[in-house]
Amino acid sequence: MSWRATILTLFPDMFPGPLGLSLAGDALARGAWHCEARNIRDHGLGKHRAVDDTPAGGGAGMVLRADVLADAIDAAVTEADQRPRLLMSPRGKPLTQARVRALAEGPGALIVCGRFEGVDERVIEGRGLEEVSIGDYILSGGEIAALVLMDACVRLLPGVMGHDQSGHDESFENGLLEYPHFTRPREWEGQAIPDVLLSGDHAKIARWRHEQSEAITRVRRPDLLTPKG
Ligand code: SAH
């Protein structure tokens, strides 16, 4: 069974979007993964298929209704469905490469995309949704966040990246940021490629890259070097 994403959204036309192109798109066309976008509005209420209402307690904006969203979720999954149920949310646990790897190794994910002010709190626990954030900023909806998560997962699926070794040296994979890359020309605007990379000494190159990774991480992301308690 290939990796399967089911997305609940008010904008199903946003999927697969950019993931229909390039390596992810080729893999999608081959059936290496599946992308099913379902419209929450199909479960909306009344003539206008209403999905949202004003927040209890007052305040600006609208909130996705618990009953509508729960119906959409129930229609999208069977009891046998073991996939994690994610809710894209700025209040969620920040997405990490480790979490992405775990998701990519599983059967896929059900991904709920919020809109407006968010979703009725009761449906989060009621349907076992795990809130996932892609960073400390606010998007207008969960769709782009879902695409980010899916892109990160799909590129790890077997056979999706042309060259299977890539992905292992990458930033975050070993807890460090990646070392700098260079390619031709050998000299560009007066700047040469570091000699060590042209030395052909693979052990020395590996050592240099590791040192560079550590130095860059120390300067840019010292938080990555502090063990988490
Ligand atoms: N009022 C909410 C923000 C709502 S933004 C708050 O202050 O927490 C509307 C929707 O966009 C959210 O329901 C969520 O699905 C999505 N979203 C916004 N920012 C996000 C982020 N950083 N990560 C993941 N999803 C996000």
Image: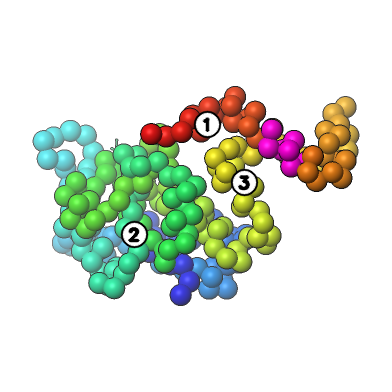
Q: Main secondary structure of the magenta part?
A: helix
* Residue 45: % across, % down: 17, 60
Few, some or many residues within 10 Å of mark 3 (<14, 14–19, 20+): some
Query: Is ligand 1 less than 8 Å from the beta carbon at label 3?
Result: no
Query: Is ligand 1 less than 8 Å from the beta carbon at label 1?
Result: no
Residue 67 left/right relative to 31: left
Q: How far apart are the alpha carbons under marks 3 and 2?
A: 25 Å
Between residue 110 and residue 37, name the one nearer to us: 110
Closer to the eye: label 1 or 2: 1
Q: Amino acid at mark 2?
A: Pro
Q: Which tag, 3 or 2, sits closer to the chain's start?
A: 2
Where does label 1 land, which residue? 225
Q: Secondary structure at mark 1?
A: helix
State whether residue 73 is above or below residue 177.
Answer: below
Magenta run includes residue 61: no
* Residue 127: % across, % down: 22, 58
Where does label 3 land, which residue? 170
Spot the residue most to the front: 203
Q: Please tell me which residue is depicted at 46% across the width and 75% down the height of the picture.
A: 1
Q: Which tag, 3 or 1, sits closer to the chain's start?
A: 3
Q: Quadrant of ligand 1?
A: top left
Q: Which tag, 1 or 2, sits closer to the chain's start?
A: 2
Q: How far apart are the alpha carbons under marks 1 and 2?
A: 29 Å
Magenta run includes residue 207: yes
* Residue 42: % across, % down: 26, 65
Residue numbers of the magenta segment: 205-211
Few, some or many residues within 10 Å of mark 1 (<14, 14–19, 20+): few
Where does label 2 land, which residue? 84
Quarter of the image holding residue 103?
A: bottom left
Q: Amino acid at mark 1?
A: Leu
Q: Please tell me which residue is depicted at 16% across the width and 40% down the height of the picture.
A: 55
Q: How is the image coloured?
A: rainbow
